[in-house]
Amino acid sequence: MNGAVIPHTPIAVDFWQIRKCPQVRLFFLSHMHSDHTVGLSSTWRNTIYCSPETGLLLSHKLKVDKKWIHPLEVGESHMLSLDEFDLVTMTVTLIDANHCPGSVMFLFEGYFGTILYTGDFRYTPKMLEQPPLNNRKQIDVLYLDNTNCHPEQTIPSREEAARQIKALIQRYPDHNVVIGLYYLGKESLLMELALNLATWIIVSPQKLEVLELLGLLDVFTTKEEGGWIRVVDQSQINYSAMVEWNKTHPTIAIIPTGREVKVLHEKIYVVPYSDHSSFQELTEFVAGLKPCSIIPVVKNHACEAYFRRYLSSKEIVCDEIQVPSSVAQFMKLGEIWKHPLPCRKVRIPNSRPRGVVFELSVEKNLPKR
Ligand SMILES: [Zn+2]
């Protein structure tokens, strides 16, 4: 499970175990991968802030009631209340995480300082060249996706990995191709293969529903005879399946992943196509941001030591963060606050210093409990 409750705040990201965080009032979801939604189900009864695409998937896959889903536009800043009287606010900006459809990073700015929560992300230099990270604002705490934080591991760019996959497919001209994926992710690879190799991509009816929900290119079909590249769940690629598939037609299987996978058949290929940043990319990201501190998103794998030299010398001491009294009071309320808090959209000028424009009026008076 990869989520966190932000200390000294009523904020949690990808953390859904309510009994363990009774003080949390604002729940954020970075993306719809299952290791970030542990504990989230149709019985959820609190407002969730996420990107519009994640909101659609959340309702579709986990059947969370739409009334609890509060999509926030990506690339925009939004002002949210941190107490029940709208006395203390914070700004949250959603940044495309370049990981899977709907995935975002959250930049929180408030009485607690500036916190960047990357969720899962694949670094691209654009992230540091565009607002809001191009203004080199001091990041006090960086929650960093450390999935690939291994200096000895080489992860090629996704473009290079896609080239490897195409070359592999072309080595087997008469073969069908089975690609092992999860519920969400690597859709852009599939679209690239469809266009480059001029074939439809065969998917299950369930997968097609998701792809249509996301409004992706029309290159997917459920018809078995529709094409020669087929997507299955990664768990379906094993020795006996390979034997079966090869009885009817010569078939290779490709697993595009940065993770280690045990291969038990000569025609199963693992290609390091990763939606997580490589170690080199993480280094570039941290060196560019120069945060004060780093907290790894994947808990059992420390990574801070690798980046110590890039950290800002500005010290922060979390215990010194003063929680405003109205926020502290809000965090102590006996039951979880169920009403959406006031939210306003904030415009960030491209190159000028940051300004605030209120674009939406909101009800100041919250509903009574
Ligand atoms: Zn993920």
Image (cartoon, rainbow, N blue to C red):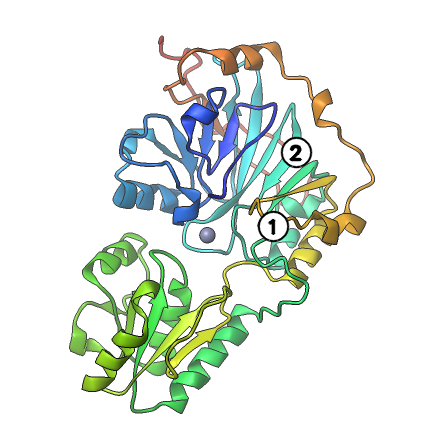
- Depth-wise, is mark 1 or mark 2 nearer the camera? 1
The residue carrying pointer 2 sits among few (fewer than 14), some (14 to 19) or many (20 or more) residues within 10 Å by Cα, namely: many
Which numbered disc, 1 or 2, marks the residue that appears first in the sequence? Answer: 2
Residue 7: x percent and y percent? 60, 27
- Disc 2 element: strand
- Judge: label 2 CB < 8 Å from ligand 1: no
Work out whether 122 lies above or below 308: below
User: Could you say where residue 145 lies in the image, as x and y percent from the top left?
Assistant: 57, 50
Q: Is residue 310 above or below residue 355?
A: below
Q: What's under tag 2, amino acid-wise? A: Thr
**Circle 1 sits in a helix, a strand or a loop, which is it?**
loop
Quadrant position of residue 43: top left
35 w.r.t. 331: above or below: below
Judging by the rendered image, the residue that carries numbered circle 2 is 114
Determine the image quadrant of residue 70.
top left
Q: In this view, does 281 lie to the left or right of 361?
A: right
Q: Which of 94 and 156 is in front in this view?
A: 156
Task: Report x, y in % for residue 297.
Answer: 57, 45
Q: Which quadrant of the figure contains the C terminus?
A: top left
Q: Residues within 10 Å of mark 1 (few under 14, many from 20)?
A: few
Give the residue at x 26% y 59%.
207
Residue bearing mark 1:
301
> Which residue is more in the foreground, 268 or 283?
268
Instruction: Identify the residue at horizontal 33%, vertical 91% (top origin).
Output: 173
Picture residue at 70% right of the left edge, 51% below the top:
286
Q: How far apart are marks 1 and 2 (CA)?
A: 24 Å
Question: Residue 242 — which label?
Answer: none
Q: Where is residue 9 shown, x and y percent of the image?
A: 57, 24
